[in-house]
Image: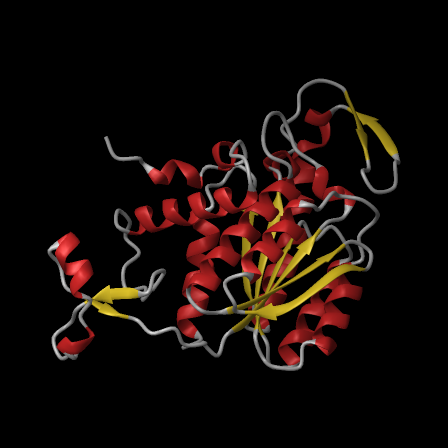
Amino acid sequence: MPTDYRKYLEPDIVSKLKGMELRARMVVKGFIAGLHKSPYHGFSVEFAEHRQYMPGDNIRDIDWKVYAKTDRYYIKEYEEETNLKAYLLLDCSASMAYRSGKRVAKLDYAGLLCGALSYMMLRQRDAVGLVTFDEKIRKYIPARSKSGHLHVLLTEIANQTPSDTTDIAVTLHEMAERIKRRGLVIVLSDLLDKPEDIIAGLKHFRYNQHQVIVFHILDPRERDFAFGAEAAFRDMETGEELTTLPYQIKKDYARQVQAFADEIASACRQSNIDYHAIDTAMPFDKALYAFLAKRERLY
């Protein structure tokens, strides 16, 4: 019985796999399997070095070894560098450690998504760089497109632990100045910072002609505050504690969180920035579709 790779789009399943490279590969395989069973058609995704033969192609480019194995005609794709340079900006601040129940922590979810995006982009001959940050930049790995670069990226992602406070704007502004060549910037964060500072940093990238995708990653409980009886809440970055009855403030809390997200989303739309609200219970395909759609528009 064939493996249903789509199950590896579920965060709780893929998080149990051993090794970041295996996790990334399984997520991407699950995504490819899902493409064949979804309404998302038209994406020209070349994850391998072959594509199906089309009328008008030169028959000299047919890979006859593949034909012998599959009884189908495939064209050899030559290894060429693309013009796309992508940079993954991964928030590793203390607030990213939060998780409710048995769900994966926000940093784990963001890291798994980073790994899958890295794997997918490098297979598409894109150059990928990584920036990890909290209140400042922890590590900056410049964009490369060589196959061995994947191990470098995945090792760095796997070694991240959440700590310190958040200052997203510092990283955004610094990287907007450091990245000289126009490219695609992908921000993965809970965005728990002053919205006006975040927006200013994102606009800095756009001013420098970069394309930007923002994945706003929260735990579902951070959005709906659906907790039980009296509970004590502690700020994971400052240590400040507050005891309250969640049901009494649930509606006001959810309204303010939504207003916060709407403010950032609206500013992103005005600046032609792709904003996507993601929670850690969502399968990874929503974020991967969003990335793929953005990449298609760049060509």
Query: Residue 218: image x %, image y %?
Result: 62, 43
Quarter holding the N terminus is: top left
In the image, what residue occupies the spot 78% across and 53% down?
A: 134
Quarter holding the C terminus is: bottom left
Left or right of 14: which side holds 91? right
Query: Residue 26: image x %, image y %?
Result: 43, 43
Left or right of 19: which side holds 40? left
Residue 213 vs residue 223, the one in the foreground:
213
In the image, what residue occupies the spot 83% across and 49% down?
A: 165
Residue 177 vs residue 29, the one in the foreground:
29
In the image, what residue occupies the spot 74% across and 60% down?
A: 139
Residue 268 vs residue 207, the one in the foreground:
207
Q: Quadrant of residue 9?
A: top left
Residue 118 vs residue 80, the one in the foreground:
80
Query: Residue 211: image x %, image y %?
Result: 56, 73
Query: Residue 254: image x %, image y %?
Result: 65, 40
In the image, what residue occupies the spot 51% across and 37% down?
A: 11
Q: Quadrant of residue 88?
A: bottom right
